[in-house]
Image (tube, rainbow, N blue to C red):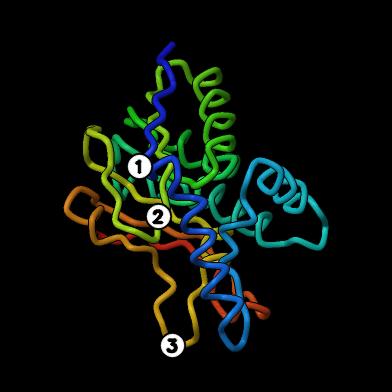
């Protein structure tokens, strides 16, 4: 069984400093706001997973249906040996994509929650002993330095994180993917339209990057 590799690219004090900066900026602005990424400490991540199981919360079900229906096509188009997931959380939906990628050697989940990464990574290694899991504690809205893993790479940005990182109106809702582009061969997203946030979270696409 491969060990779980966890890499922290955020300094130990970065979370506190960034939170203070976001609070100062957000609560002195008009209108006042705070980035939703601060929901996701250990308790917040657990609560969110429970929310996704509620009948009223349809995006997770829609995303799962899309992945079940389209994972084979995504796998065939990418031929990926490494899967990088931005905002991975519990990696529950991602298992459909992992199972479809028959040549997959490494999985790189990226999240700000160390507890979510550790729990999900340990579960995946127990379920799939031959899979190398390199968890990355990082803010994917900033430039990323990915671990050395075999290509081609598939970068997955699934629905829930794309809904929670929506920028102000008129700006792109994509993560900072430029640092990943030279190393990645495809990108996919599962998104549905969020009326409250005014952005997409339900659609699956694959394209070279």
The N terminus: image quadrant: top left
Would residue 93 appear left or right of 17 to someone viewing this image? right
Q: Is residue 127 above or below residue 144?
A: above
Q: Quadrant of residue 10?
A: top left
Q: Is residue 202 visible?
A: no
Label 1, label 2: how far apart the Cα atoms are: 10 Å
Q: Nearer the viewer, residue 135 or 97?
A: 135
Q: Nearer the viewer, mark 1 or mark 2?
A: 1
| Residue 48 drawn at (x, y percent) | 70, 51
The C terminus: image quadrant: bottom left
Q: Residues within 10 Å of mark 3 (few under 14, many from 20)?
A: few
Q: Secondary structure at mark 3?
A: loop
In terms of sequence position, does the residue under pointer 3 or pointer 2 come before the other?
2
Would residue 51 appear left or right of 194 to someone viewing this image? right
| Residue 29 drawn at (x, y percent) | 56, 84
Residue assigned mark 1: 9
Q: Nearer the viewer, residue 92 or 207?
A: 92
* Residue 140 numbered tag: 2
Tags 1 and 3 touching, CB below 8 Å: no
Residue assigned mark 3: 170
| Residue 15 drawn at (x, y percent) | 49, 50
């Amino acid at each position: 069984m491969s060990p779980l590799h966890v890499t922290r690219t955020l300094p130990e004090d970065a979370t506190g400093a960034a939170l203070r900066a976001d609070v100062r900026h957000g609560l002195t602005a008009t209108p006042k706001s705070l980035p939703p990424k601060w929901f996701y400490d250990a308790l917040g991540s657990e609560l969110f997973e429970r929310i996704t199981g509620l009948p009223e919360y349809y995006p997770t079900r829609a995303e799962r249906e899309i992945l079940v229906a389209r994972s084979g096509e995504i796998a065939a188009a990418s031929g990926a040996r490494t899967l990088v997931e931005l905002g991975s959380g519990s990696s529950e939906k991602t298992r459909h994509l992992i199972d479809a990628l028959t040549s997959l050697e490494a999985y790189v989940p990226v999240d700000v929650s160390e507890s979510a990464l550790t729990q999900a990574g340990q579960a995946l290694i127990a379920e799939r002993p031959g899979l190398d899991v390199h968890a990355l504690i990082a803010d994917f809205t900033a430039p990323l330095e990915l671990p050395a893993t075999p290509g081609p790479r598939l970068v997955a940005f699934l629905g829930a994180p794309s809904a929670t990182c929506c920028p102000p109106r008129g700006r792109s809702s994509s993560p900072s993917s430029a640092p990943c582009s030279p190393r990645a061969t495809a990108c996919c997203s599962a998104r549905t339209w969020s009326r409250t946030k005014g952005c997409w979270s339900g659609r699956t696409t694959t394209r070279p990057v």
